[in-house]
Image (cartoon, grey):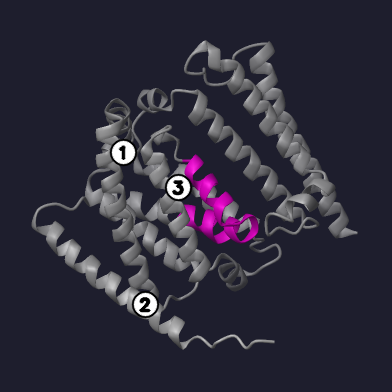
Amino acid sequence: MGKRWAGLAAEILSGVAGGLIALLGAADLTVARVLTPATNPNLQLALDLTVMLTGLAAAAIAAQPVRRRVAHLLPIDADNPVHALALALTVILLGIDVAVIVFTDVLATAQAQPPLTIADLFFDETPFLVFALVGVGLFIRRELPDTAARLGLVLPMWWQIAVALAAAGAFYFFVQQVDVASHRWTPDLAHRVDAATNHIFGQLGWPAGSLAVALIPGLCEELLFRGALQPRIGLLPTALLFTSIHTQYALSLDTAAVLVIALGLGLLRKYTNTTTSCTCHISYNLLVGIGVAGAAANLAIAAELALVGVSAYVIWSRRRGAPTPVEP
């Protein structure tokens, strides 16, 4: 009976949340402007309809037959109320973020807001941590050790740390190349993205700020996206959702780079654990925060080559030592 009531409550919450989002889009369309204005009036209708469709899709998830169909595509339990609610909230977050990125001027909006402080960063990222812990049932269905295990938090092996650091360096090098291509192929957009990013993080360039930018998102975002969500909704949907929350890059090559990094972090989680993906995320953020130039660049390249070599050797040796499947 308890499970049935929990399922009913999840369906009601999903339906209500989706309905409210749909009503928000309808209100903006017919009554008053309650959403962020679109880039131009011709796109306002598309923005409103996208928000409405997002709400309707989230509400549809409340129906168990729909969830059963989704379960054929994603690794969810259609009868699990937690999975049902998480899926509905995922649809809402992804749909709203995509609508904002595609149809509004997120770069102008970003520059109109005050720069981030460490306190802002903490309050912006902490909900991710709370959702991750509550979503996996901390102190509800699981105690702390089981929660850590479910989230993929383990004591990493030395080679996993090496792989995480090697991946962070590879991501950093990749993003630098994307940045060069962005300034060459889309210079106006690239300069706007740079201006918005510098404005947002301009007050966090000092050592404590750089450390906060590395640690707080690296922990909170990894625990939610790679720890809690990826085992339930899969690698690609999680990567798309992760990319969508980085609205400060608008529709640019930087957004494509974030998607590649999200997929890389997801693969680290899949084949190792969340501790490894956290280590990689934090290390990458530190590299971006401190920058690498001059003599330090040569040292970083040498260290990266060494880490890549160690990682490649470990992966090769582990694959070589894996038992060969026996033919039936």
Which of pointers 1 and 3 indicates the residue nearer the eye?
3
Secondary structure beneath dot 2 equals: helix
59 w.r.t. 154: above or below: above
Question: Whole-Å distance between the Cαs marked 1 and 3?
Answer: 21 Å
Question: Whole-Å distance between the Cαs marked 2 and 3?
Answer: 25 Å
Mark 2 or mark 1: name the one nearer the start of the chain: 2
Type of the residue with mark 3? Leu
Task: Name the residue located 48 percent from the left edge and 63 percent from the top edge.
Answer: 267
Q: Is residue 263 visible?
A: yes
Instruction: From the viewer's side, name the closer residue of 324 and 101.
Output: 324
Expressed as whole percent of the image width and height from the top left, the position of residue 283 reads 32, 59
Expressed as whole percent of the image width and height from the top left, the position of residue 161 reads 36, 72
- Secondary structure mostly seen in the magenta stretch: helix
Type of the residue with mark 1? Phe
* Snapshot quadrant of residue 145: bottom right
Q: Which residue is mark 3?
A: 259
User: Start and end of the magenta stretch?
Assistant: 219-245
